[in-house]
Amino acid sequence: MLRECQIVIIGGGPAGLAAGLYAARARLKTVIIERAKWGGQATTTEELANYPGSVEEPTGPKLMARMKEQAEQFGAELLTTEVTAIESHGDDYILHVKDGQIKAGAVIIGTGAQPQLLGVPGELEFRGKGVSYCATCDADFFTDLEVVVIGGGDAAVEEAIYLTKFASKVTIIHRRNEFRAARSIVDKALQNEKISIIWDSVVEEIRGDGIVQEVSLKNVKTGMKQEMATDGVFIFTGTKPVNDLFNGLIKINEKGYIITDEDMCTSRKGIFAAGDVRVKKLRQVVTAAADGAIAAISAEKYLEEKHEQEKAKKLLDKEVKKIC
């Protein structure tokens, strides 16, 4: 079965839902596709107090449910299915989904990025209950508490420094004996009295009773194990953009993120990208939502221009036929 719409949005996180809200409000026939959980990663955050003007006692699930409701109220159609392929069809695009095909004049990609998981016992159990992948989002919940940061790259060291504004103590756990982060960042960390470092070690397990209480460490050189009490675990071992569908279709940087301009336009006409899947400095719910709004307005303008071009072409063809 082939269904048609004007804009199809891949991804039901804050970027996709915001894009859907703006596109549907512009009275464009809009379809939003989500393969898993509506709201994306934001639904794993217990509190979103830093989202401007958010609902009372804001949680990730509550805010995302409201975004989803708004998109539906404005007329967006929400589909829970998976896009398996995208192909161009003249000036349009056809998306293959599990139960058919969808033809659209413009596509907005909002598939997001996923944090690299440690894959240790307790990580998923305590996600949002002491385990975090975003210091900017969650640091204030650990005011005057002790936390550990796992990782040794720029993000890990920078976030550890940021956490010292809130936590009483920050311990960086790194599997090597030196950081991969830039020297200027490392120097700042080494000079910070709140930061301590455990070298050549990995976290083997995260434990607690309802919330994180301790981690189990292993020295990779000596094999020695130890238990360490902590109130929180911040994991910064990298992120992975969800971009499998788009390799070869649009330009992607060396880390796998989609390259766009400030209007969210990709290297291919009619395809836009918003949120964590694109190259950007700050990955937050508020910036994802902003990207989504911009992408929808840019897609609307693109469709209007395409429509005018089609009208002009038909008029020209009509005039040529008269002459002939």
Image: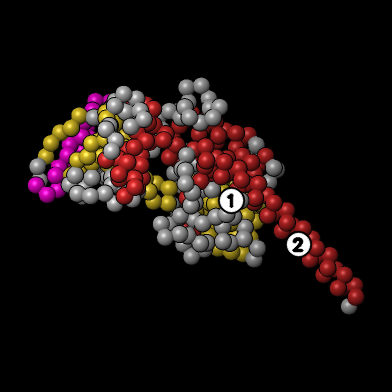
Q: Position of residue 101 (x, y in %)?
A: 56, 56
Residue 317, horizontal then vertical, whole percent: 82, 70
Estimate the x, y position of residue 106 in percent, counting from the top left.
62, 55
Which amino acid, mark 2? Glu
Q: Which label's residue is closer to the chain start, 1 or 2?
A: 1
Q: Can you identify the residue that label 1 sits on?
A: 262
Residue 221 highlighted magenta (yes or no): yes
Residue 272 location (% of width, % of height) = 58, 53
In magenta segment, residue 58: no
Front of the two marks 1 and 2: 1
Q: For mark 2, what is the residue?
A: 310
The residue range painted magenta reads: 203-222
The residue that appears at 45% across and 37% down in the rendered structure is 42
Q: What residue do we see at 20% from left, 34% from top?
A: 215
Quick check: 146 above or below 320? above
The tag on residue 168 is none
